[in-house]
Image: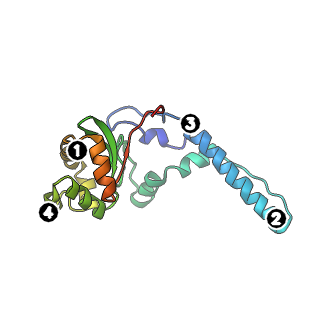
Amino acid sequence: MGGSMSITGVPDGEPMKMGLSMFDLTAGLHGVIGILAALQDRHTTGLGQHVDISMLDVSVALLQNQGMNYLAKKERQRRVGNNHPNVVPYQVMPSENGHFILTASNDEQFERFCKVAGRSDLMKDDRFSTMKARVVNRSIVTPALNEITKTQTTGWWLEKLEADGVGCAPILHPDE
């Protein structure tokens, strides 16, 4: 109802639900925040409060980037799979032995990623040099980066990227 399924899934696939009860859980958290605010207000004013939480309100609030993009551009957000709508790379990357998350959230982090990867030359390529260019050229940038990250193990990437301050994380199973 809030729009999340319309933006969840692979670009040319059908809408998908999330793999967990995100809005149920988040509505509960918003409820706790409301209760704490009401208790603080009671402490200050001596008056009680009515706390009302709507799962629709919560689901719309969680559309942060997509909602902002719509309000700013009046364009419907397309599904981008595991990618971030405004940041490239901010996605699952293949490695020699699995996958990891790479979140080079700004040009400086991307430049450090390129240095770690031994590909500082990418920063001289107009398609890669700025976040805006990487988003516009996602269909070129992502496959190129995938080829680079496949050359080393997940552990290697995590060690090197973390040491250089580039956002990254392993993809773990609950039993790990």
Q: Residue at x 68, y 54 (%)?
A: 33
Q: Is residue 104 in view from this perspective? A: no
For the C terminus, which image quadrant? top left
Query: Secondary structure beneath disc 4?
Result: helix
Of badges 1 and 2, nearer the viewer stands: 1
Residue in front for this viewpoint, 151 or 103: 151
In three-dimensional space, the C-alpha distance between marks 3 and 1, rounded to whole angstroms, equals: 32 Å
Q: Residue at x 72, y 59 (%)?
A: 37
Classify 10 Å Cα crowding around label 3: few (below 14), some (14-19), many (20 and above).
few
- Would you say the residues marked 3 and 2 are in contact, meaning their CB atoms lie under 8 Å apart? no
The residue indicated by pointer 4 is 124
The residue indicated by pointer 2 is 43
Q: Quadrant of residue 24?
A: top right
Numbered circles on residues, count: 4
The residue indicated by pointer 3 is 21
- Would you say the residues marked 1 and 4 are in contact, meaning their CB atoms lie under 8 Å apart? no
Query: Secondary structure beneath disc 2?
Result: helix
In three-dimensional space, the C-alpha distance between marks 4 and 3, rounded to whole angstroms, equals: 43 Å
Query: Secondary structure beneath disc 3?
Result: loop
Say what amino acid the circle numbered 3 marks.
Ser
In three-dimensional space, the C-alpha distance between marks 3 and 2, rounded to whole angstroms, equals: 33 Å
Q: Residue at x 53, y 35 (%)?
A: 20
N-terminal-most mark, 2 or 4: 2
* Mark identifier at residue 149: 1
- Would you say the residues marked 3 and 1 are in contact, meaning their CB atoms lie under 8 Å apart? no
N-terminal-most mark, 4 or 3: 3
Say what amino acid the circle numbered 2 marks.
His
N-terminal-most mark, 3 or 2: 3
Of badges 3 and 2, nearer the viewer stands: 2
Above or below residue 142? Residue 15 is above
Above or below residue 144? Residue 106 is below
Query: Secondary structure beneath disc 1?
Result: helix
